[in-house]
Image (cartoon, rainbow, N blue to C red):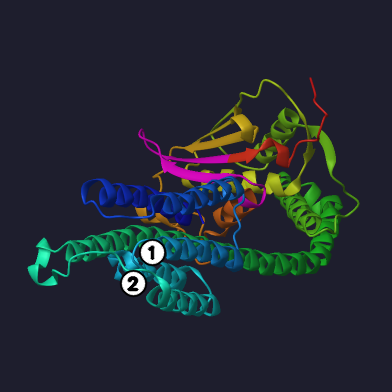
């Protein structure tokens, strides 16, 4: 619709120029007053259209059809007053027909064809031809041939400009639709993974509990209790089993089947501090830097999905850089978009391969050379996107990789509940 409004303004300028040239320079006798009335109606309709469609983003076929009908009828009125079918600008009907074929549904396009045909018949039957010399044999020196040439150039130029724009809009829409389809496929993949994980968590609960009981019995047996080395190994096994049970509980919680646990109200700084402390306690890392730069604390809901997303990024960085890791947390104001939580994970590993950066966030894209890898970052990207945020990956100039998580605070904040 915006393209049609622009095209209509060009038609207004073209009609004013043509009327002035024909009457003032060429001395052709035209009903200028009546033609200016038609032009005033077209200008009024275009101003109304601009105000009507400036904000609204959705236009249906019927509205486009009525807009093109107004253009056809205004062109017919001007041709009727300026020679009818003898006017070389009668070929501008083809512009309306081609635009209808591109923009409208088939029934609407054929209706425009029928209406322009009826208008052409009316012009041939009732319009008074212009009083012009019959000098077609003079070629480009003929006024009528010059008019046809100008009409051809105008038609061709407008068609190239506006069909190109319309085609670009269609391609943009197709690209957006393809992106939505890709996202739907990825989310369906996540749902399947979630169902498998939930089922596996149910199945793992019983054997983990059995192992925990057996190890508890072993700790009390003299053969193991009196052997410091075996006793330490049993203690480590109990810690790892407890970690497995925590992971299983987290999966069930995410699936809506929490074992007596619920969401907890906290603040963003406490949430991050606790999450980092919990993650740090269960991993072996030589040097870990955690920089919480958030000044103004706000109340949020402790979310297990968000915890897992951040832990996935940290785990991936830890695998690439087991000696050094850095996490920076901050808030950034984005104007009308509101505050955003920014988490940046830096490592000193080999960095991302160029192909990996291009496919970042796609399932089963990994440089670790092991099947099934790459799902962690895939889940991170999709969780961030579900929360309205984004994930960006890059290589650091000094070596290593950087992954930046950006999430809107409104996705996790408690409304009107600020913590000091």
Q: Is residue 44 visible in the rendered structure shown here?
A: yes
Is residue 363 visible in the rendered structure shown here?
Answer: no
Q: Residue at x 69, y 33 (%)?
A: 272
Using the image as rendered, state which of residue 15 and residue 278 is in the foreground.
Answer: 15
Q: Residue 218's image quarter?
A: bottom right
Q: Compared with residue 280, is residue 63 higher up or lower down, i.e. above or below?
A: below
Whether residue 407 sits left or right of residue 260 in the image: it is: left
Q: Is residue 180 left or right of residue 352?
A: right
**Residue 299 drawn at (x, y percent):** 79, 31
Please tell me the numbered disc located at residue 247. Answer: none
**Residue 77 vertical placement versus 229 (above, below):** below
Question: Helix, strand, or loop for circle 1?
Answer: helix
- What residue sits 38% from the left and 54% below the top? 31
Q: Position of residue 281 (x, y in %)?
A: 68, 38
Residue lying at the far right of the rendered structure? 260
Judge whether residue 57 is colored magenta.
no
Q: CA distance from mark 2 to mark 1?
A: 7 Å
Viewer-closest of 272 and 246: 272
Q: Secondary structure at mark 2?
A: helix
- Seen at 52% across and 78% down, the residue is 111
Q: Where's residue 147, x and y in %?
A: 23, 62
413 on left or right of 26: right
Verify CB contact (< 8 Å) between mark 2 and mark 1.
yes
Mark with earlier residue (2, 1): 1
- Residue tagged 1: 79
**Where does residue 21 sit, x and y in percent of width and height?**
26, 48
Quadrant where the image shows the C terminus: top right
Q: Which residues are magenta?
A: 385-405
Label 1 Cα crowd, 10 Å radius (few <14 / some 14-19 / many 20+): many
Residue, disc 2 = 85
């Amino acid at each position: 619709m915006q393209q049609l409004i622009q095209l209509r303004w060009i038609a207004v300028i073209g009609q004013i120029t043509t009327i002035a040239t024909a009457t003032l320079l060429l001395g052709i006798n035209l009903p200028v007053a009546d033609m200016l009335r038609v032009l005033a109606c077209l200008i009024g309709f275009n101003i109304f259209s601009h105000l009507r469609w400036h904000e609204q983003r959705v236009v249906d076929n019927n509205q486009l059809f009525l807009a093109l009908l107004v253009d056809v009828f205004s062109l017919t009125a001007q041709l009727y007053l300026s020679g009818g079918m003898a006017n070389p600008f009668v070929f501008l009907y083809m512009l309306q027909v081609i635009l209808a074929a591109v923009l409208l549904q088939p029934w609407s396009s054929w209706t425009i064809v029928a209406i322009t045909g009826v208008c052409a018949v009316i012009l041939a039957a009732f319009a008074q031809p212009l009083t012009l010399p019959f000098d077609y044999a003079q070629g480009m020196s003929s006024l009528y041939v010059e008019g046809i040439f100008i009409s051809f150039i105008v038609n061709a130029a407008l068609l190239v400009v506006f069909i190109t724009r319309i085609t670009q809009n269609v391609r943009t829409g197709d690209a957006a639709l393809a992106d939505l389809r890709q996202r739907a496929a990825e989310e369906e993949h996540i749902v399947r993974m979630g169902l498998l994980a939930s089922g596996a968590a149910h199945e793992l609960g019983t054997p983990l509990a059995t192992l925990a009981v057996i190890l508890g019995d072993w700790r009390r047996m003299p053969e193991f209790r009196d052997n410091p080395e075996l006793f330490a190994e049993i203690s480590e096994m109990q810690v790892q089993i407890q970690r497995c049970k925590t992971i299983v509980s987290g999966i069930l919680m995410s699936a809506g089947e929490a074992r007596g646990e619920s969401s907890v109200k906290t603040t963003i700084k406490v949430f991050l501090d606790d999450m980092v402390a919990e993650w740090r306690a269960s991993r072996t890392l030589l040097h870990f830097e955690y920089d919480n730069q958030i000044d103004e604390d706000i109340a949020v809901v402790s979310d297990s999905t968000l915890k897992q997303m951040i832990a996935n990024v940290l785990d991936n960085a830890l695998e690439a850089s087991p000696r050094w890791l850095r996490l920076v947390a901050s808030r950034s104001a984005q104007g009308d978009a509101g505050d955003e939580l920014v988490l940046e994970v830096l490592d000193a590993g080999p960095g991302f391969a160029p192909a990996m950066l291009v496919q970042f966030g796609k399932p089963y894209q990994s440089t670790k050379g092991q099947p099934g890898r790459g799902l962690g970052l895939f889940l991170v990207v999709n969780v961030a996107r579900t929360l309205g945020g984004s994930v960006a990956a890059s290589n650091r100039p000094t070596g290593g990789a950087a992954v930046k998580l950006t999430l809107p605070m409104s996705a996790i904040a408690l409304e009107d509940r600020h913590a000091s």
